[in-house]
Image (cartoon, coloured by chain):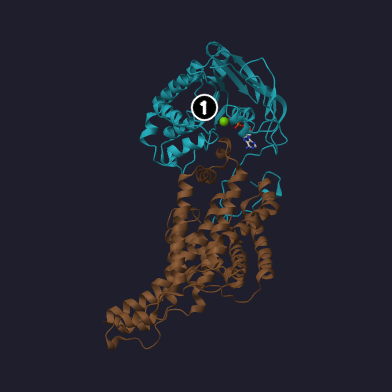
Chain colours: A cyan, B brown
Amino acid sequence: MSNTGNPYQDDRGNKDRSITNSGGGTMTLPGTSGRATPAPGGPFLAAEMMTGGYGPVDILHDCTLTVEKGEIAVIVGPNGAGKSTAMKAVFGMLNLRGGHVKLDGEDITLLSPQDRVAKGMGFVPQVNNVFPSMSVEENLEMGAFLRRDDFRATMEQVYDLFPILKDKRRQAAGELSGGQRQQVAVGRALMTQPKLLMLDEPTAGVSPIVMDELFDRIIEVARTGISILMVEQNARQALEIADKGYVLVQGANRYTDTGEALLANPEVRRTFLGG
Amino acid sequence: MDLLNAIVALLNFVVIPATAYGAQLALGALGVTLIYGILRFSNFAHGDTMALGTGFVILFTWWLQSMGLSFGPLPTAFLALPLGIALTAAVVLLTDRSVYRFYRKQKAAPVILVIVSMGVMFVMNGVTRFVIGVDEIRFADGAKFLINANDFKAATGLAEGLAFKASQAQTIVTAVAVVALLFWFLNKTRTGKSMRAYSDNEDLALLSGISPERVVAVTWIIASGLAVIAGTLYGLDKSFKAFNYFQLLLPIFASAIVGGLGSPLGAIAGGFLIAFSEVGFTYAWKKVATYVLPESLAPDGLAQLLSTDYKFAVSFAILIVVLLFKPTGLFKGKSV
Ligand SMILES: Nc1ncnc2c1ncn2[C@@H]1O[C@H](COP(=O)(O)OP(=O)(O)OP(=O)(O)O)[C@@H](O)[C@H]1O
Ligand SMILES: [Mg+2]
């Protein structure tokens, strides 16, 4: 924590857990949330020309991601390419220096993440994506936190999608296997009934069988009209189910095409798909 | 008969006082553990929040009494309690606004908040002395005893008397009610669950639309309520003296850590463990021993392990022993 240059965040090597509870929030959010302005036309999600990073150094350089309604868009690229950073930028967890994010005919560039949830975006981060000490059911309830209506039907849908969660609904999410935890994380994001579901490596640490299953579930979700923007390490499988694929390198778009075309592109195959 | 006398003496001098004291510590430790779990720092100002809040309750009690109000057999302080809690919560929220929030916005390391809370502690310390003074104050009214020692002797014919003070009974009943309410709140209500979610994973709570400022405010209000209730019960049971509350910080922290920091259940268990050991180690066991042991074995001295002056040392000895064998405390809190 001491490399941020902010003296308040320097804890001088304190290791005494009896006086502090580490693991607080890491997101640096813009102080105030602006308003959404109408911006009709264009794709369902249009994050265009995004430039910015965590500190003074830009990680993203004119990065553009668009998703149409009910479409699956997949982002692939080497480690450290800025895939997670691009997702965070789309979700408003990063201060952008340039570019804009439009959702469903509205410019939401100035909205805070909470307000974006209310606008119909759901996000499953790459790591720490469940509430470990809370039960599976409570995790799902927290996903529906902003909803004031009866969300039991949505919960049933999530349980139908991931039957294992129903059996484990009283168990703490932290005690589940990695794959089950990913299902909780996706389920939590679905509880808001998002119009756009953003998944950062949903299959990380998941066995091939569960991975196929999870991909099937994601296709099912997309069929219900939800747009999906997903980062995947298993590039080949992910591009197979993708309507649109993005290859990101060093924070910039390298290739953009349909999933099929990217899989067929010999250069993409050689450099990013391992032959 | 001797065995009965021994049991009565044990109840009278150890079990009942330690249970009441344990309940008071548990309520205090619950506040500490909540703040630790949700705001992520050890709040050194908790003892002085207790003192300030109890000071407010005493002032309101006097005011109610001056208007000729009383609460029948119960102490008037119980009537004043809601007012005291409201005022203390307001002061604490104001402190959060003017002091802690700045550091929260900076994403300050928790250890800095610990030091900040020490500053708040000193200020509150002074404010309490301004508001209510430094003297010992007894503010308990209403019925004094549930069971009176002399009546008990007369009724049972035993040599030992059993006294069950009203304040002790009130402490235990209130503590049980408050703890039940708190657990219901944390486990069943939407706001309570959002607090646990925030404690578990701050970033994800934010992504779920949970408002951090609201969680923080509710946490402060609950912690203030617990502090004022604990302080008032302690004051009714013993007496109010600002300095004693400052000292209470030690056994309260010991309770929270022994039980497992961040675990509400642990805070309660820790409170009773510390209370029983403190009382057990500093009680002169001669009386009980004389009843139970044959005459030849009866102790000459007081059979007191430690003088009461050392009672705080007991908390720390327990703390060390527990942490040596269970670093996360009894109830799987954070490892220390
Ligand atoms: N919280 C952060 N603060 C500062 N820099 C960061 C932070 N997170 C990531 N970075 C930097 O941003 C760059 C891109 O990281 P990012 O996490 O977006 O990569 P990624 O494409 O998701 O990689 P992976 O496939 O390994 O998940 C890296 O150089 C990383 O060091
Ligand atoms: Mg990543």
Amino acid type, callout 1:
Gln
Q: Nearer the viewer, residue A168 or A260?
A: A168
Q: Quadrant of ligand 1?
A: top right
Q: Quadrant of residue A254?
A: top right
Mark 1: few, some, or many residues within 10 Å (few <14, many ≥20)? Answer: many
Residue assigned mark 1: A193
Residue B283 visible to an observer of this rendering = yes
In this rendering, the answer to whether B263 lies above or below A164 is: below
- Percent of width and height locating residue B18: 43, 70
Task: Say which element carries label 1.
Answer: loop
**Relative side of A151 to B96, left or right:** left
The chain under label 1 reads A
Residue at 55% x, 38% y is B204
Q: Nearer the viewer, residue B57 or B246?
A: B57
In this rendering, the answer to whether B200 lies above or below B275 is: above
Q: Quadrant of residue B152?
A: bottom left
**What is the tally of numbered marks visible in this picture?**
1
Q: Quadrant of residue A69?
A: top right
**Relative side of B298 to A138, left or right:** left
- Percent of width and height locating residue A242: 52, 16
Residue B285 visible to an observer of this rendering = no
- Percent of width and height locating residue B26: 48, 62
In this rendering, the answer to whether A151 lies above or below A221 is: below
Q: Nearer the viewer, residue B187 or A208?
A: B187
**Relative side of B185 to B135, left or right:** left
Residue at 58% x, 36% y is B209
In this rendering, the answer to whether B204 lies above or below A153 is: below
Q: Nearer the viewer, residue B97 or B274?
A: B97
- Percent of width and height locating residue B281: 43, 75
